[in-house]
Image (cartoon, coloured by chain):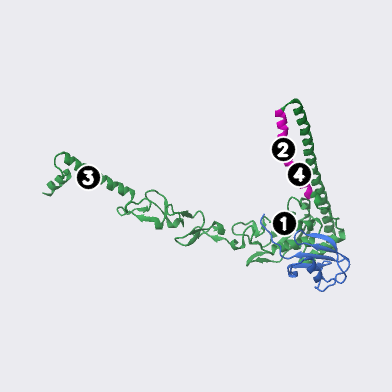
Amino acid sequence: MEDKKNLIRMAYKVQEALIMLKQSRYLEMMRQLTTFTGQLEELTAQSKKMGISLLNGWFSAAERCCKSVNRLLGDIPHSVSKLRQLTNAPQKELPKLSTLFDELNQVQQEFGSLEIDNAKSTISVITESITLDDVYLGPFRIQLELQKFNELYTSSPYHVIALSPNPAATDETVTHPHVSNEILCEGDGSVSIRAALEQGRLSDFFTMVKSILTTYNPDSPYVALIDWSGEACYDCGYVMSRDDIYFCSLCQRDYCSECSTYCRCCDEGCCVGCAEQCSYCEDQVCMNCMQECAKCNSACCSSCLEENVCPNCKEEMENNNDDQECKISEAKQNGNPGQPETSETQIKLAS
Amino acid sequence: MRLLYINNDGGGFADYVQVSEGTTVEQFFKDKMQGSKPDDFLIRVNRQPVPREYVLQEGDRVTVTPTKIEGAEI
């Protein structure tokens, strides 16, 4: 428990941070106004230039003015929209020191713990251990950094730190389905969280962050809880998310992309172990599409086999047939039809 | 009578509202958070939890904060 003096000191720092935030909002407004008035001045200048160009009949100069005006007309609505965002939400009065003290006291009561680091100007609470859909995520520290308070409109002034991290198997920076690199994606809570911080309602801020941490939105997580532990590749053991799994229909197991391939004959996915290389075309094919040459017994894919023999054996057989045909035709030319030379030799040898 | 109502649901706002004398916290919640279940919210009056039959007083500070807020991926 923090003592009263410490709470008052921190309440004072929160008030200072809120003043800085207020100032940063007006500074941003000034910056946007300067940009906007600059654009209007340039528009006026282009209008004058166009008038002079027309008076002198300088049509190419007038065309250049047209292009500049067109560009400015595209930029101005963007500036107006930014300015509107800043001017639409009127600033509330700064909370009194006593109110901020009450806020800190309430945080202490609600969470049972409040850690104040005066040197770093941080206020932290620790949640109870969180388990979502039977996945243990452990307790989290919600750490509000007052020095980053004036960056509220551009970045997050707080961190969500896992104290007993059980990160997603596929991404160790994701310690919660909605936390990555210690930054919470607030989703539905973003506007109300910002409003609470702007008004110094620290208790509401910490309560809302806790509400997000204890709620799981399956529609938009960094890593879905169903994939939290990941799936191991049966071959190399690499842990991957459900979306990265390749299923081998032959051995009925899950593999990673490195240990998977596909059959070039039937286009079915299979693991590297269930695929073989065709001895002729050297493509990877699945076991179902791999056959044996009836002549040389070599492994050959069904695309390369012709009449159950591989292309090499087929060629050899064709060459043999051609030789025989040549010899027959030679024999015919020598007046001994139907008796090829080889047959004569064979007869002689036989006798 | 006038009281400060802080609603942390949706856009989140804090403003003064008028309620009639004798309004209980339960009636106030039903009126302001139509269609919502009280179990899904932390309701605090003057920073403290109160029973549903608590009768609101002039100047009370009522805070309604959802216990279930869906986060997202950036």
**Residue at (79, 35) in percent of width and height:** A44
Check disc 1: other Cα within 10 Å, few if <14, some if 14-19, many if 20+: some
Q: Determine the CA span between mark 3 and mark 2.
A: 84 Å
Dot label at residue A79: 4
Provide the chain ID for the residue under circle 1. A
Residue A324's disc number: 3
Counting residues from the start of the chain, the first of labels 1 and 3 encountered is 1
In the image, A148 versus A333, the foreground residue is: A333
Residue at 28% of width from left, 46% of height from top? A318
Colour for chain A in the figure: green
| Residue B49 in view (yes/no) | no
The residue identified by callout 2 is A70
Q: Which residues are magenta?
A: A59-85
* Residue found farthest to the left: A351
Secondary structure beneath label 2: helix
In the rendered structure, find residue A159 and report the number of the disc placed on it.
1
Observer-side mark, 1 or 4, equals: 4
| SS category of the residue bearing label 4 | helix
